[in-house]
Image (spheres, rainbow, N blue to C red):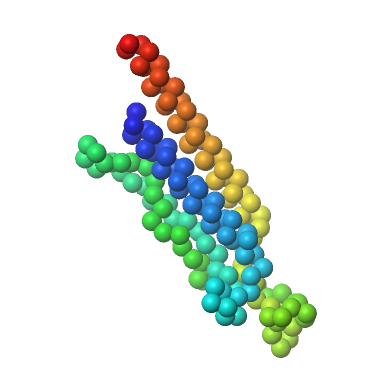
């Protein structure tokens, strides 16, 4: 039963990291400068999930997030904003290519996956308690 708890807890951690990446994307949806103050729009973040298989008697199983990737290939979105301080000569600014609806959908999916893992942990805990009652 501990393996089941390991799998569910790894899912909780993975979904929390995914939600942090989504929150970062939404918070920076209008950011025109990078973390060094250079005129470069924010690069969207995404999580990479990887299956971790149990190896040996003490190995853990579940899902891991080996990296939080940065999408370097997306071109910026040009928006006409003649009063923005970061505008170019034509009055355009470069914004990150982040789709709010996609991010919201991913956030809902991540939240539901988190809840499902919590539910699986509750069922496992209940089964363990019932097993202990039967044994004792």
Against 41, residue 15 (above or below) is above
Residue ID at (24%, 39%):
58
Residue ID at (49%, 52%):
17
**Corner quadrant of residue 90:** bottom right
The answer to whether 125 appears left or right of 30 in the picture is left
Looking at the rendered image, the quarter that the C terminus falls into is top left
Against 60, residue 128 (above or below) is above
Residue ID at (47%, 42%):
12
Q: Residue 16 at x, y = what percent?
A: 50, 48
The answer to whether 77 appears left or right of 55 in the picture is right
The answer to whether 102 appears left or right of 20 in the picture is right
Name the one closer to the observer, 44 or 13: 13
Residue 74 in view in this figure: no
Against 115, residue 37 (above or below) is below
Against 106, residue 31 (above or below) is below
**Corner quadrant of residue 25:** bottom right
> Furthest residue to the left?
56
């Amino acid at each position: 039963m501990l393996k089941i708890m390991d799998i569910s807890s790894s899912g909780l951690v993975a979904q929390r990291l995914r939600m942090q990446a989504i929150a970062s994307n939404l918070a920076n949806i209008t950011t025109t400068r990078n973390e060094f103050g250079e005129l470069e729009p924010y690069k969207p973040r995404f999580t990479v999930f990887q299956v971790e298989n149990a190896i040996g008697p003490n190995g853990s199983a579940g899902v891991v997030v080996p990296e939080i990737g940065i999408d370097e290939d997306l071109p910026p979105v040009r928006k006409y904003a003649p009063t923005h301080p970061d505008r170019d000569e034509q009055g355009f600014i470069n914004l990150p290519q982040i789709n709010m609806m996609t991010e919201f959908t991913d956030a809902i999916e991540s939240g539901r996956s988190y809840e499902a893992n919590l539910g699986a942990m509750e069922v496992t805990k209940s089964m363990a308690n019932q097993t202990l009652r039967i044994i004792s």
